[in-house]
Image (cartoon, rainbow, N blue to C red):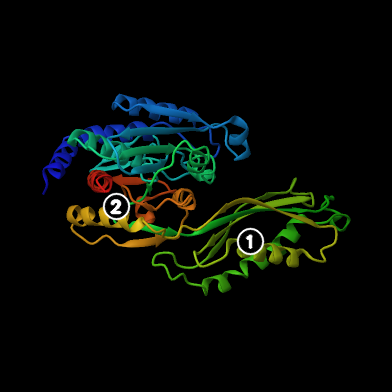
């Protein structure tokens, strides 16, 4: 073990309680998206980062752009630490979270710790990596890192697509890193993920009294026909299997539906939103076109019915980019030593902000604090959790990998 590695390990070993307190402070500030009023959470996170000794840049996103992306407020936080000449590595995690939902056994914003496990909304996805990345950077400072630059990018719009978070930081030229590491889990290095298409379908008919339904045009009846046609696509999608380990097959889910006026009224409007996961081998444009053709065909010939289809989100798949092998090697080497096992480079079936860095030509992988699977973390479900030992191990791995990367 080199003297620098020993310093990094020793410093982080002494910061376990401080890192847990830092993470708890992030988890305790609600940042649900929707509704997406996330500027207060960013202000609280900035204050915690400044308490660690960092200079924090606050980049508020213009209100019109925020609202165009379905949110109320968003501020991106950037920390830059230049040690000397060398590459720039950006570390990105998102602080917005899905609403807690039902079924929690603890306060979702309590950051309760039981038997070495912290519980709370966002504690694994991905507020944990606010702590991972901040303390990894502090460890480099403590060890006397001499080369390169580390940037922390803490953003608040991943649940809305990332267009006013990482994509905005890059398009506004606020940052232009040479490499990027995005929030992930400890037992895999993620190099690829699915794309995602969200469509909103509005089915319009004509209301009428339920005593005389023939005088109306039933939007719900029409919507059920369209839904049946969409669900019929599932068997065909399941026959396509990605060649990338961990990705699986394309998927189609209708996750939101609303409509109707009252029990005794023929519905005049039904809207629903669908989620289509796109594997890296697919064309996102063709995937969308196929769905639109399916919807159009199902609605054809329905008297008095009009259908409108609106794209809400199109997230391109993440695929490995030249240069990412350096990230994989550095993270993998130290993960193997600290976790005691080979950590594979793999894909995941979800989508993340990492794609924005890759789309800008930046070699990118996902790695951070968390268990072996999303299901194990309770991400997006009740009692989301993080084993604190995984947090400390991931922080050490990231710090040591950064030191290698910055030294070229």
Which residue does the numbered mark 1 point to in the structure image?
288
Vertical order, 344 against 47 (above or below): below
Tell me the residue at 62%/66% (across/down).
Answer: 231
Point out residue 79 in the picture as x, y percentages from the top left corner: 37, 32
193 relative to 338 in the view: left or right = right
Residue at 36 percent of width and 56 percent of height: 324
The quadrant where residue 118 appears: top left
Q: Which circle marks residue 186 in the picture?
A: 2
Local crowd at mark 2 within 10 Å, few (<14), some, or many (≥20)? many
Q: Is residue 70 above or below residue 208?
A: above
Residue 389 x, y percent position in the rendering: 23, 46
Image position, residue 303 (x, y; %): 85, 61
Of residues 153 and 339, the one nearer the viewer is: 153
As helix, strand or loop, the secondary structure at mark 1 comes to helix
- Secondary structure, mark 2, is loop
Residue 219 rendering spot, x and y as whole percentages? 77, 55
* Snapshot quadrant of residue 131: top left
Q: Report whether residue 212 is seen.
A: yes
For marks 1 and 2 on the same chain, the one whose residue lies earlier in the sequence: 2
């Amino acid at each position: 073990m080199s003297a620098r590695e020993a310093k990094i390990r020793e410093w982080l070993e002494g910061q376990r309680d401080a890192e847990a307190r830092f993470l708890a402070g992030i988890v305790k500030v609600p940042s649900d998206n929707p509704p997406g009023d996330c500027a207060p959470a960013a202000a609280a996170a900035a204050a915690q980062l400044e308490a660690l000794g960092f200079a924090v840049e606050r980049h508020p996103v213009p209100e019109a752009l925020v609202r165009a992306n379905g949110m109320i407020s968003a501020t991106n936080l950037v920390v830059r630490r230049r040690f000397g000449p060398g590459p720039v590595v950006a570390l990105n995690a998102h602080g917005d979270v899905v609403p807690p939902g039902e079924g929690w056994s603890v306060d979702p914003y309590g950051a309760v710790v039981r038997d070495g496990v912290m519980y709370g909304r966002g504690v694994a996805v991905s507020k944990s990596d606010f702590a991972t990345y901040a303390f990894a950077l502090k460890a480099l400072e403590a060890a006397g890192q001499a080369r390169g630059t580390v940037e922390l990018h803490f953003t608040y719009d991943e649940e809305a697509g990332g267009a006013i978070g990482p994509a905005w930081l890059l398009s506004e030229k606020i940052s232009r890193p040479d490499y990027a590491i995005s929030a992930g889990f400890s037992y895999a290095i993620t190099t690829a993920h699915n794309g995602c298409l969200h469509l909103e379908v509005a089915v319009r008919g004509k209301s009428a009294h339920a005593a005389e339904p023939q005088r109306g045009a039933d939007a719900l009846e029409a919507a059920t026909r369209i839904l049946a046609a969409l669900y019929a696509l599932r068997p065909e999608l399941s026959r396509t299997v990605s060649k990338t380990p961990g990705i699986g097959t394309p998927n189609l889910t209708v996750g939101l539906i609303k409509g109707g006026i009252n029990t005794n009224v023929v519905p005049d409007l039904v809207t629903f939103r669908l989620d289509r996961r796109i594997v890296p081998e697919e064309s996102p444009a063709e995937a969308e076109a196929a769905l639109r053709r399916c919807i159009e065909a199902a609605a054809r010939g329905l008297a008095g019915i009009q259908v409108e289809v609106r794209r809400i989100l199109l997230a391109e798949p993440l695929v490995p980019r030249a240069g990412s092998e350096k990230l994989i090697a550095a993270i993998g080497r130290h993960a193997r030593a600290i976790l005691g096992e080979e950590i594979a480079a793999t894909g995941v079936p979800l989508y993340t902000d990492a794609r924005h860095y890759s789309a800008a030509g930046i070699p990118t992988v996902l790695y951070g604090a968390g268990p072996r699977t999303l299901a194990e973390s309770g991400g997006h479900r009740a009692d989301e959790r993080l084993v604190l030992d995984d947090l400390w191990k991931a922080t050490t791995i990231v710090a040591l990998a950064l030191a290698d990367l910055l030294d070229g």
